[in-house]
């Protein structure tokens, strides 16, 4: 989403090095390097990092359609059919529907070579619903992009440490709960934690909860599916997780969890800001997401 002065140079979006192009009036694409700093247990780019890319490219393609109004991400779904190993990983977004109060975007996730050629078919599919907000004087001004094609890149110092360390994410090894401060480094243009970063925290929390329920001898899992609903802004922090593992029991190896993220410093005692369903798969196992029929 194009906002004057956003993101600053010292910001997670800048350090991810997103390279974005609005290709037509209804389509856009954004890519990042698949580096060890953003990799998950399966060696591919973490689902939560991909959700961040999807959120950015969805905003980039949708922004012109809502002007002069504003918009906010209401929900985001990401389903993976395989690891996003790159060397580049690109999300390609298209507007599906523009209604009076909502706008829906879908995106394909593709591995891309250094020469720009696709490496195999799509490895993921995503959808986003944006709530259209009436223009108000206290909201930042959306920058009207030039007529497409137009391309820009978020340029920061890059990630010298794993992305979770850069975001100061903490995992409690005894409870498998996660927490993260609400730092300017991860803020959106409203001053709250950026939506893709919230999806990343939900991914970590769900994977940790499932891994804890499976036990140390069950082997590592990678998050393959994320369904994220944004309920409120996380402004104060720390953002803290509660997770309910589904299907846990004697002799069973669970693979999914429902995660609630709370703003622990909010005046109401920790409001729920985000609810996510997180699905995992054992590393090395075939992945067939619920939305695989949409991959094309």
Image: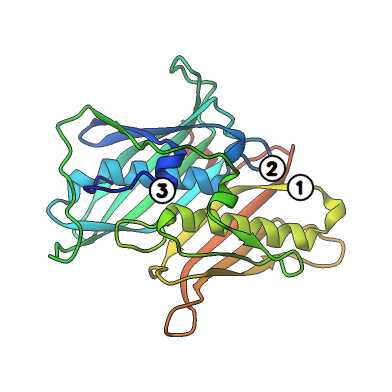
In the picture, measured across the screen, residue 156 lies left or right of residue 140, that is: right
Please provide percent x and percent y for residue 140.
Answer: 20, 57
Marks 3 and 2 close (CB-CB < 8 Å): no
The relative height of residue 168 versus residue 42 in the rendered view (above or below) is below
Residue at 48%, 58% in the rendered image: 198
Marks 2 and 1 close (CB-CB < 8 Å): yes
**Mark number displayed over residue 11:** 3
Please provide percent x and percent y for residue 179.
Answer: 58, 65
Whole-angstrom CA distance, mark 3 to mark 2, is 24 Å
The quadrant holding residue 141 is bottom left
Q: Nearer the viewer, mark 3 or mark 2?
A: 3
**Mark number displayed over residue 41:** 2
Secondary structure at badge 3 equals loop
In the picture, measured across the screen, residue 163 lies left or right of residue 263, that is: right
**Mark number displayed over residue 220:** 1
Q: Nearer the viewer, residue 8 or 213?
A: 8
Secondary structure at badge 1 equals loop
Badge 3 or badge 1: first in the primary sequence = 3
Mark 3 surroundings: few (<14), some (14-19) or many (≥20) residues within 10 A: many
Please provide percent x and percent y for residue 6.
Answer: 29, 48
Q: Nearer the viewer, residue 213 or 122?
A: 213
**Mark number displayed over residue 116:** none
Mark 1 surroundings: few (<14), some (14-19) or many (≥20) residues within 10 A: some
Residue at 53%, 62% in the rendered image: 276
Secondary structure at badge 2 equals loop
């Amino acid at each position: 989403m194009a906002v004057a002065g956003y993101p600053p140079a010292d910001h997670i979006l800048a350090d991810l090095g997103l390279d974005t192009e609005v290709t037509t009036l209804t389509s856009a694409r954004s890519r990042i390097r698949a580096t060890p700093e953003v990799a998950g247990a399966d060696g591919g780019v973490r689902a939560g990092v991909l959700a961040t890319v999807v959120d950015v490219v969805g905003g980039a393609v949708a922004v012109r359609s809502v002007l002069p109004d504003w918009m906010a991400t209401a929900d985001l779904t990401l389903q993976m059919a395989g690891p996003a190993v790159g060397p580049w990983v690109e999300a390609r977004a298209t507007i599906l529907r523009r209604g009076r109060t909502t706008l829906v975007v879908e995106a394909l996730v593709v591995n891309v070579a250094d020469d720009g050629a696709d490496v195999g078919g799509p490895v993921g599919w995503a959808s986003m619903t944006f709530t259209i907000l009436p223009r108000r004087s206290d909201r930042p001004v959306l920058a009207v992009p030039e007529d497409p094609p137009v391309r820009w890149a978020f340029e920061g110092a890059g990630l010298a440490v794993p992305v979770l360390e850069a975001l100061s994410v903490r995992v409690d090894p005894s409870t498998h709960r996660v927490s993260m401060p609400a730092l300017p480094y991860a803020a959106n243009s409203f001053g709250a934690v950026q939506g893709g970063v919230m999806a990343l925290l939900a991914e970590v929390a769900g994977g940790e909860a499932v891994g804890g329920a499976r036990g140390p001898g069950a082997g590592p899992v990678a998050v393959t599916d994320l369904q994220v609903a944004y309920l409120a802004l996380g402004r104060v922090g720390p953002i803290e997780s509660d997770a309910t593992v589904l299907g846990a029991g004697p002799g069973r190896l669970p693979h999914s969890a429902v995660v609630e993220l709370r703003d622990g410093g909010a005046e109401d005692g920790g409001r729920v800001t985000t609810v996510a369903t997180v699905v995992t798969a054992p590393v090395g196992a075939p992945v067939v997401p619920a939305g695989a029929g949409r991959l094309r």
